[in-house]
Image (spheres, rainbow, N blue to C red):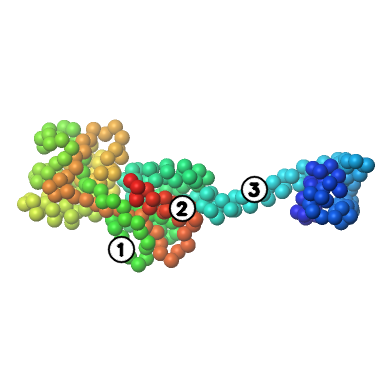
Amino acid sequence: MDVKDMKHFLAIVEAGSINAAAKRLHIAQPPLSRQMMQLEKKLGVKLLVRGQRKIQLTEAGRLLQNRSEQFLGQIENTVKEIREYNAGARGTLSIGTVTSSGATILPRIVRAFRKTFPGVSFQLWEGETNRIIELLHQGAIEIGLVRFSLESELYESIRLPNEPLVIALNKSYAASLGDDGDCIHLSELAGTPLLIHRKYEAMIVEHCEKCGFTPEFVCISDDVMPILAWADADIGIAIVPRAAIGLIPNAGLIYKTIINPRLETSSSIIWMQNRYLSTVARNFLTMLTTIQSNP
């Protein structure tokens, strides 16, 4: 018994007679009648009781009807799912992201993406840029969000808008810096204990020296979370990307944007060049590009 037998058998059941089914199937009645007799012979059971006007199903025929509907339904659903996977409407997308960006940049994109592709799920990996690149090379993720503009023949990339660096400080420390609103001049950080991410060290030192002072680093870390926690504990003033605001909920931190000069960091979405990219990933990148073009 094959799929054709099942389809033709169900056509007869739905039409009520072999002659009516043959017309629906656009085939002659005698071959269809012979096909059913051969099917009954193969199975060794009677499936149809042929009446003058309408066929009737035996118990075996009703069982075959039930099983055929289930089987053909599964085939139809499988074909549909395969087509949806091919179109990127279903599947799982693995993304790696630096911590602060994963909490701020990605949610907006994912929310818009799931409105169009609700059948797609995500696996999210967090870590520092070097870890994200490592995961990308291992094939554990398809797309990475890293904290700088990566120029390399190994990767394709989409440059994200520059993001200002801000200071995060305990409310008790804020009074000693005065109240200039939401901004602070870089020169005002002279003589203050600073907590920074290692990747910004050279940039911060360069700009501080141009302002006439050498920065005092209490802590240099590979992650923004510890320095935010230390700032909340009033150990020093953290310098972090604006995306880090709110990473520590209910913290007693105040944030101010650094100006004169304005310090900025760049981010990029990257993926491996010359490596297969799933349709889900391609759809995600297309939507990201659209959102970037229409902020």
Counting from the top left corner in percent of width and height, residue 31 is at: 87, 56
Which kind of residue does numbered mark 3 sit on?
A: Asn
Picture residue at 18% right of the left edge, 50% below the top = 263
Q: Secondary structure at mark 2?
A: helix
Q: Secondary structure at mark 3?
A: helix
Picture residue at 51% right of the left edge, 52% below the top = 88
Q: Marks 2 and 1, how far apart in space?
A: 23 Å
Residues 10 and 181: in front is 10
Other residues around mark 2 within 10 Å, as few (<14) / some (14–19) / many (≥20): some
Picture residue at 90% right of the left edge, 46% below the top = 46
Counting from the top left corner in percent of width and height, residue 140 is at: 45, 56
Counting from the top left corner in percent of width and height, residue 34 is at: 89, 55
Q: Marks 2 and 3, how far apart in space?
A: 23 Å
Residues 46 and 246: in front is 46
Residues 11 and 159: in front is 11
Residue linked to disc 3: 77
In the image, is 10 to the left or to the right of 219? right
Residue 151, numbered circle: 1
Residues 223 and 80: in front is 80
In the image, is 215 to the left or to the right of 281? left
Q: Marks 1 and 3, how far apart in space?
A: 44 Å
Residue linked to disc 2: 283
